[in-house]
Amino acid sequence: MVTDGRIPHAILLHGPVGTGKFMLARAFAQYLHCQSPTPDGEPCGKCPSCLQHQSFNHVDTLYVFPVVKTDKLKEPISDDYMQDFKDFVAVNPLMDFDRWAQTFDKKNAQPQIYVYESEKLEQRLAVTTTVSKYKIVLLWLPEKMNEQTANKLLKLIEEPFGDTIFVLVSDNPAGILPTIYSRCRPIEMKRLSDDAVAGYLMSQLSVDHQDALAIAHIATGNLISALRSMDATSVSRMFFDYFVQLMRLAYMRDVKGLRQWSEDVTTMGREQEIKFYDYCQRLIRENFIYNFNCPDLVYLNRTESEFSKKFARFITENNAEKIIDVMNKASIDIGGNANGKIVNFDVAIKMIILIKNF
């Protein structure tokens, strides 16, 4: 679009979370402002404009993003949190909204783009560009605007200043005001491939190839989820240990041990118990597939894979679906505030029967 001189005044980059949409938006803005772009369509990375972009200091690039109200900031705008935003993007270039929300002192507040932002933006866009041909507005998560804010922004998009380009970056385009959506050039970004996610984990974090593929498969193209899995390694190990313990005690018909197991699992708390049973269901599915001797279809890390060499034969068409049903029901019951010890012990007793029925 830049090469052909056909740049829309409003672009909407949208697609799944964790695909690097905001990184692309920043790269596009930098390329558009670059004073010496390369022949193959890249910003040079060395000119004053590129250096300013890399440090978030380009005077003709404006950032808009969700913020929160506080006792001191009754009418907050993005500029009030700009240093926090710079620090956040430096560590989280993939733009994890949940982590952004956690950076605020007011933990229960949901960051959003307030109407004051549109008013301030209109004032800033009325000023002529300083060093560039275009002023560029990078707007992260337009779906976080309330209707009043969106309507004010709509006016700016409908009647844009001639030197202004809007780049909206959305995780949920269905949540954007339809009139705004209809005035943007939508560009959809697809989910990342498992190989791409695994490649990132291997190159950037030195993750083992098998572990990286297993994490990538579970993340379903979401690099943010993959990185969260890396952060939760100790939790995953705990889930694995509880799973192994359950299956071994059930195989030995150790009722006393299973009662203690059910009490131990309960101490994790409801949220972790639900995640544990989700993990168990995945492991049962993977062990069922393991029996088909098709390594390309199995996504287990090294520890799980080593265990499955001997365990997978116990998971067959006779019991796989029944075990998953039991665990899924347990997850639902715990989520509905059922007594964790009773639910977990019920699962344990049923495993005695199901693990033998293969």
Image (cartoon, rainbow, N blue to C red):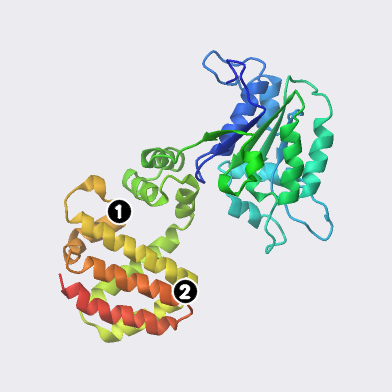
Q: State the mark number for residue 335.
A: 2
Q: Residue 98: which quarter of the image?
A: bottom right
Closer to the camera in the image, 12 or 136: 12
Find the distance from the CA under tag 1 to the CA under tag 2: 27 Å
Residue depicted at x 45% and y 54%: 229
Closer to the camera in the image, 87 or 338: 338
SS for dot 1:
loop
- Looking at the picture, how far across and down is residue 168, in whole percent? 63, 37
Residue depicted at x 59% and y 43%: 170
SS for dot 2:
helix
Q: Quadrant of the N terminus?
A: top right
Residue depicted at x 56% and y 47%: 174
- Looking at the picture, how far across and down is residue 304, in whole percent? 29, 58
Given the image, on which type of amino acid does mark 2 rest? Gly
Closer to the camera in the image, 215 or 128: 128
- Looking at the picture, how far across and down is residue 66, in whole percent? 69, 49
Check disc 1 and report the residue beneath it. 300
How packed is label 1: few (under 14 Cα within 10 Å), some, or many (20 or more)? many
Q: Quadrant of the C terminus?
A: bottom left
How packed is label 2: few (under 14 Cα within 10 Å), some, or many (20 or more)? some
Q: Residue 274: which quarter of the image?
A: bottom left
Q: State the mark number for residue 176.
A: none
Q: Is residue 345 above or below residue 49?
A: below
Q: Is residue 16 above or below residue 137?
A: below
Can residue 12 be seen at all in this image of the molecule?
yes
Q: Is residue 180 left or right of residue 307?
A: right
- Looking at the picture, how far across and down is residue 301, in whole percent? 32, 53
Q: Nearer the viewer, mark 1 or mark 2?
A: 2
Q: Going from the N terminus, do you reach mark 1 or mark 2 first?
A: 1
Label 1 with label 2: CB-CB less than 8 Å? no
Given the image, on which type of amino acid does mark 1 rest? Leu
Number of labels in the image equals 2
